[in-house]
Image (cartoon, rainbow, N blue to C red):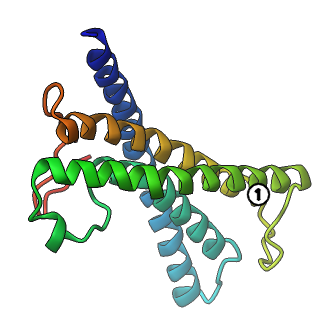
Amino acid sequence: MNTEPGAALRLAAAIDAITRFVGKTIAWLILPMMMSLVWEVVARYFFNAPTVWAYDMTFMLYGTFFMIGSAWTLQRGGHIRTDNYYGRWSDRTKARVDLACYAVFFFPAMVVFAWLGAEYFWKSMLQNERIVTSPWLPIVWPFKFVMPATAVLLLLQGIAECIRAWPRAFGRGPTIVSPTPPAEGEVSL
């Protein structure tokens, strides 16, 4: 069928667009995180008036930034792999290993992560859970929502990566590569 590869590529492109949009949007969390850290340092050391909220705000923002941004990192090939082996392999072998690793490790782990994260979030939301170790007592369920959301984004991006790896692995259709990461030292949003 001629429409099948086109539809798959359109699906991969749509997933990539979602991942890119979410990644670029979530990258802006670095600003409120930095501002809360600067506020805390100035308040603590210049005015001897530490805040009760800055630590909690910082770890919740960083956790969100780190987790939600992981799908964008996957899209851009930024996760760790054993390059001293992987770099020597042919494109076909790389694609086959990628597909096998996605099937055996990635997808099962992400399904479990999504399931457990959703349960964890749901229980927290129903109880209106708060961080009891903090004098600020912030609600925590919005932060826990990040876990199942991350798993869904990673699952979607994993599907896009497999769609691109399939033609390289089995020689059908055009070779499709992931969006190119920036050069060393280059920052691209």
Please say if 9 is above or below 46.
above
Looking at the image, which residue is at 32% across and 34% down? Answer: 163
Task: Please provide percent x and percent y for residue 154.
Answer: 47, 47
Q: Position of residue 124 (x, y in %)?
A: 82, 56
Query: Can the viewer see residue 76?
Result: yes
Q: Is residue 29 visible?
A: no
Point 28% across, 24% down: residue: 9
Residue nearest the viewer, comparing 21 with 96: 96
The amino acid beneath tag 1 is Tyr
Q: Quadrant of the rendered structure where residue 141 is? A: bottom right
Q: Which quadrant would residue 30 be assigned to in this image? A: bottom left
Frontmost residue, 70 versus 51: 70
Asked if 68 appears above or below 38 in the picture, the reply is: above
116 relative position to 71: left or right: right
Say few, some or many: other residues with alpha carbon within 10 Å of mark 1 (under 14 / 14 to 19 / 20 or more): some
The quadrant the N terminus occupies is top left
Q: Measured from the top left, where is residue 73 in percent x and y? A: 34, 54
Front one among 49 and 105: 105
**Residue 31 screen position, x and y as percent:** 43, 58
Q: Secondary structure at mark 1?
A: helix
Q: Which residue is label 1 attached to? A: 120
Q: State whether residue 62 is above or below residue 9.
A: below
User: As drawn, is 78 to the left or to the right of 112?
Assistant: left
Left or right: residue 89 compared with residue 152: left
Residue sitting at the far front: 170
- Residue at (32, 62) in percent of width and height: 79
Q: Residue at x 23, y 48 (%)?
A: 95
